[in-house]
Image: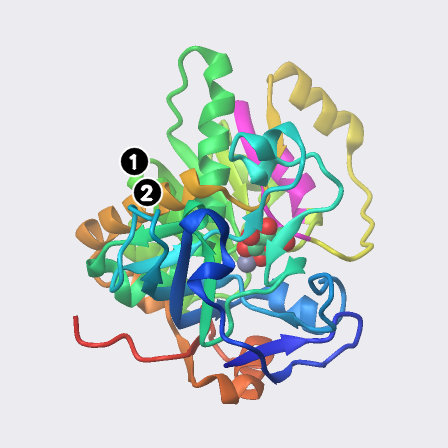
Amino acid sequence: MRAIAVTPGVPGSVRLVEMPSPEVSDVGGGRGVLVRVLRVGVDGTDKEINAAEYGAAPEGSDFLVIGHEGFGQVEATGPNVTEVEPGDYVVATVRRPGGSIYDLIGTNDMTTDSVYYERGINLRHGFMSEYYVDDAEFVVKVPRGLKDVGVLLEPMTVVEKGVAQAYEIQRRLRVWRPRRAAVMGAGTIGLLATLALRLRGLEVVTFGKTPKPHLNAELVEALGASYVTSDELPVADSPARFPGGFDLIFEATGYSPIVFDSMRALARNGVLVLSSVTGGDRRVEVPADRINLEFVLGNKVMVGTVNANREYFEAGVRDMSQAELEYPGWLARLLTHPVRGLENYRELFDKLTAGKGAIKVYCEVAGLGPD
Ligand code: BGC
Ligand code: ZN
């Protein structure tokens, strides 16, 4: 079968490769699920893997099949799989278990191991191929009614985990009634975070870079949230406009200095969730005493979040279902840049790196079919 792969360590090495098709029996215990890939989304992680900033091939392979935002249809299942059947739409989780106690209880996303295994990212082939096989444990069913937007589930899980962690942490307060949230960034993750927080009934202010009119701003406003640019309202000064600050802040800009501005915009007892993977070496000067003082006197929390386990994929399915009922057609508006066929991987990467107005760039590996 055909797949899109890179040679880790070699910048710009993305290419088409031929490899053996996987089989259900590749997974032990009769628990294999063979999936025909329909769509695969790409994001900054893929860009950075092709730039050879990180990424590692599985042992014994000199290439890494990319793609961690998969969406496909079950083709066949092993004899001990009861959860899904041929024809079902599915998305597979990304991280595979290591050895820490967190991995042993199904929370691989919380591993304390220094080596981690992520399909399409680190030491495991990804989904940008005609087929893949995985253990039913890692395969999550997507309702038929979400098939058009199913490729957004993996990015949605990043948000689900961050928000769930925030609520879990806030149980420290015995009672927490968050009213106002801010989302830093209006890219795919920022937009999905805005959605998740609106679905939970919060007033949301989303900070972007590009002035209106702008599709991302329109999408924010379509959810009943407010869009502001950080030029028009510097984040650190935002409590002047939103007195008391924000009860929950979700950071998803990819620009680390905004973290310290966000710390200053957090309400008393508030929680700041950091989700940007920033590989650079940026330095900033910050009003350290003041930020520290306000954190201490305000009992504030800041938490990092990466990846997502099965639980968050299931939560993502529920939120996306609710979104389709509450904001019909909204999710599909994020699918701005489709590229048909694995062979057009160059166009895929061109759109990813320079696509005008791109929100979600994805490869249509195969058609979705009639049902
Ligand atoms: C993926 C996560 C992954 C993270 C770090 C993100 O792009 O969506 O699943 O854990 O990169 O590798
Ligand atoms: Zn990603």
Q: Is residue 139 at all visible to an observer of this figure?
A: yes
The residues bearing labels 1 and 2 have C-alpha atoms spaced at a distance of: 5 Å
| Quarter placement of the C terminus | bottom left
**Front residue of 116 and 247:** 116
Residue at mark 2: C-beta within 8 A of ligand 1: no
Q: Is residue 23 above or below residue 175?
A: below
Name which residue lies at 78% across and 39% down.
286
Three-letter residue code for mark 2:
Arg
Task: Name the residue located 33 percent from the left edge and 63 percent from the top edge.
Answer: 76
Residue 5: within the magenta? no
Q: Can you give x and y, in whole percent of width and height, for residue 154 in the image?
A: 45, 55
For the point 40% across and 72% down, which residue is it? 39
Residue 287 is drawn in which quadrant?
A: top right
How is the rendered protein coloured?
rainbow
Characterize the local packing of mark 2: few (<14), some (14-19) or many (20 or more) Cα atoms within 10 angstroms: some
Determine whether the beta carbon of the residue marked 1 sits less than 8 angstroms from the nearest atom of ligand 1: no
Q: Position of residue 116 (x, y in %)?
A: 68, 47
Contact flag, marks 1 and 2 (Cβ < 8 Å): yes
Find residue 225 and report its horizontal and vertical position in percent: 35, 48
Residue 330 percent across, percent down from the top left: 28, 61
Residue occupying image coordinates x 46% and y 67%: 23
Kindly state the secondary structure of the residue where label 2 is placed. Answer: helix
Q: Which mark is residue 198?
A: 2
**Tag 1: amino acid:** Gly
Asked if the stretch drawn in magenta spans residue 273, the answer is: yes
Question: Dot 1 corresponds to which residue?
Answer: 201
Say above or below: 8 vs 112: below
Q: Which mark is residue 44?
A: none
Q: Which contiguous range is marked in magenta?
A: 258-277
Give the structural element (helix, strand or loop) at label 1: loop
